[in-house]
Amino acid sequence: MINFQNVIKRYEDGHEALCDVSFSMARGEMAFLTGHSGAGKSTLLKLIMLMERASKGQIVVGEQNLSRIPKRQIPYFRRHIGVVFQNHRLLYDRSIFDNVALPLEISGASPRDIGRRVRAALDKVGLLSKEKLQPMQLSGGEQQRVGIARAVVNKPPLLLADEPTGNLDPELSEEIMKLFAEFNQVGVTVLIASHDLALIHHMHHRVIEIHQGRLAQSATMVENHG
Amino acid sequence: MAKQQNAPLPATKPGKGNAKPKPTSGAKVAHKQNPLNSYFSNHLKVIKSTIQDQRERPLAAFFTCSVIGVTFVLPVLLAILLANAQSINRGWDGSAQITLVLKQEVPALDAGVLAREIAKRSSIEASRFIDKAAALEEFKEQFALEDAIDYLDENPLPHVILVKPDKSLNNIDLMTNIKDSLESLAEVESALLDVIWVQRLQSMTEVLLKAVWLVAIMLAIAIVLILGNTIRLAIENRKEEIAVVKLVGGTDSFVRRPFLYMGAFFGLGGGLISLILINFILFVLEEPIHELARSYQSNFNLSGLNFESTLFLLILGMVLGWFGSWLAVRKHLDAIQPT
């Protein structure tokens, strides 16, 4: 599903965020991306999302070579990737329902389908009863679940998360992680950047460790859960 | 527009490892509707939410529209006055006449025949022969110069034929042609076309027309800039929304759409406000202009905006608004990339 080959990302200011990163993830796999802040976790996710382009090397996502995707095709590419952010990035001027419906509206779904699928996604994250509320009326954990519902409402084959539990207490964090594991159970490839090591080890999934822009030796080897 | 091509990532189901990249998860296909339908329903939704947004900030929307409306008033008003001046130009034929001064040696009998012949021409409506003796009598009576004129040995006045051109020829060039052809007649000493004031008016309206165009172009630019700035602020306010929309796969045209509609909406509102202002101004000017016209023995009436010009003004407002916002969007949207 994801394949990095000798990927280098150097920013314009000369800072090298990733150097010579190679790894791959199979379809239906779930993995954690760990490392100190600034190690390059976010950069790696951004490369997959085409929010950034690699300076060197090859990235293939879902059989598409990212360097061959022209700028105007990026939106269509992104519709097949769900993303969850640390700060949720919900839109605070609209209801929970409308937040989750956004990706469907963008892809031109019919109102009937939007209703059905938004409710299915909200049901999955346990917030079906709150669809009419505004994001501000929800707790941090609930807001993050709205973010997850928005990420999966399109049924993307790949789900990325950047520190999805960064602002949550351990109990809520575990709930969120379990939610991701559930999506993985139905076949979604899941890659989560997190530095919550205790929680990660508890989850028994592959861990990809990144250290100062390089993959730690052991990381690519550690593989369990099939 | 709402195409969802490429489907770069294959199915979600495990065990379908080497599936070709295509949108396999049945639901994905099911939720798609006719692309044209979804295109229009998205547009409709954007229009609704644009109107809704403005209703939440009625005062701000009103001010923006007013700025555009007031900017519209000047060129439109000038254009209306100009159109009226041109209609004076066109309507002057009733008073147009060509005076043919005949040569002294032409006898009165020949002159009378000539007058009748001229009247037969298709371009001429009527002609009247004025005998020089009759003219002298009239002259004496009118100016009480009997004694002075009695001193003259002979009548100094020439025979004159007054020619009234056909009403359908209401254009100065055609009139001048007729005058020239009459002047070339052997019996005619000279021909006078009483059109100087019309010519002056015409050249004035030509100058004015250029001025109206210049003013209109400059104010159109002003409207585009004003709206561009308004839209720029709107974009600034919705930065986060734009970033999120781009992150979840919103195309540029999807992101652009609400702003373009917002611009068109402001343009339309500006057009409406300018209509109200213009009609008010015309209402105020109507009486004084009527008075002025009466003092020239004219029953001239100021005509305002007809249906077509009203429609044109509203559409022009929308187009300018759309264009201003397009410029702003083109400049600023690309700069907003999700981070």
Image: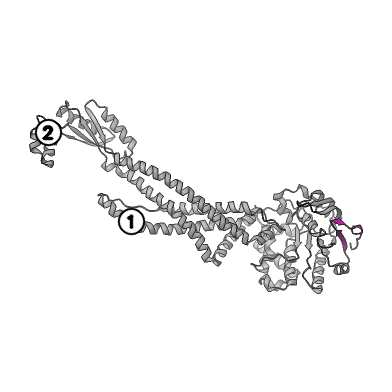
Callout 2 amino acid = Ala
- Residue at x-position 13% and y-position 41%: B143
Query: Where B96 sits versus A27, above or below?
Result: above
Label 1 crowd (10 A; few <14 / some 14-19 / many >=20): some
Label 2 crowd (10 A; few <14 / some 14-19 / many >=20): some
Q: Position of residue A44 (x, y in %)?
A: 80, 56
| Alpha carbon separation for disc pair 2 and 1 | 47 Å
- Residue at x-position 91% and y-position 60%: A222
- Chain of the residue that carries numbered disc 2 in the rendered image: B
Element class at badge 1:
helix
Query: Where B83 sits versus B106, above or below?
Result: below
Q: Over which residues does the magenta segment extend? A: A202-226
Q: Are marks 2 and 1 in contact (CB under 8 Å)?
A: no
Q: Position of residue A201 (x, y in %)?
A: 88, 67
Depth order, front residue of B190/B311: B190
Residue pointed to by mark 2:
B133
Magenta-colored stretch includes residue B294:
no
Q: Residue furthest front?
A: A13
Tell me the quarter of the image containing the C terminus of chain B: bottom right
Residue pointed to by mark 1:
B286
Element class at badge 2:
helix
| Of the image marks 2 and 1, the number of the one nearer the N terminus | 2
- Residue at x-position 35% and y-position 47%: B85
**B251 to the left or right of A4:** left
- Residue at x-position 76% and y-position 59%: A156
